[in-house]
Image (tube, grey):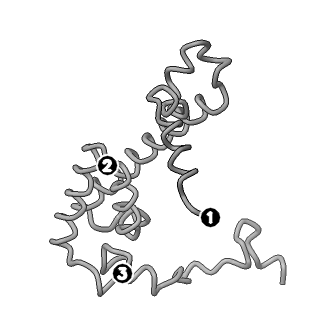
Amino acid sequence: MESSQNPNTNPNSNPNRIQNPVSSQIAALWPTIDASLGLSEEESVSYARRFYKFGFALLPFLWAVNCFYFWPVLRDSHSFPRIRPYIVGSAIGFAIFMAIISSWALTFSIGGERLFGPVWNKLVMYNLADKLGLTAALLRFVDAIPN
């Protein structure tokens, strides 16, 4: 019996098996995560383009919203070819933005005064109230509040 089986085939695999037919049908029919409650394909192109372009206007979190809302388009590489370039561009733009903002935050939080030296006091904002003389006024305000 074992001699009749081909050693190169996996006995547990079924080549006729469809992988998750419901999600593949929804992804093929609807470009948004809310399926039939969402936008039509024509409206989706307009919204995806708008979110993509407004992401360049210093609103990169719109790229994240774009990727989330049009997740079926991002996940399936062969669906909705008119929408996909905007979604993939949004994903790339958001990844670059997150890399830049994370490196900036880590540079300031880890490096701090050791990295920047005496310029550090001019860069940080936590001593801005001292520079403007607002701490004394704030303390007087807090003292004036009845307990």
Which circle, 1 or 3, is nearer the viewer? 1
Pick whichever of labels 2 and 1 is earlier in the sequence: 2
Q: Position of residue 94 (x, y in %)?
A: 41, 48
Q: Relative to 73, is 5 above or below?
A: below
Amino acid type shown at disc 3: Asp
Per the image, the residue denoted by label 1 is 147
Q: Residue most toward the right?
A: 2
Q: Relative to 34, is 131 above or below?
A: above
Query: In the image, 44: left or right of 26?
Result: left
Query: In the image, 35: left or right of 82?
Result: right
Which circle, 2 or 1, is nearer the viewer? 1
Amino acid type shown at disc 2: Leu
Per the image, the residue denoted by label 3 is 34
Q: Position of residue 19 (x, y in %)?
A: 53, 80
Amino acid type shown at disc 1: Asn
Q: Nearer the viewer, residue 94 or 35?
A: 94
Quarter of image, res 35: bottom left
Quadrant of the snapshot with the C terminus: bottom right
Pick whichever of labels 2 and 3 is earlier in the sequence: 3
* Mark 1 residue element: loop
Residue in the picture at 72% in, 72% down: 10
Per the image, the residue denoted by label 2 is 59
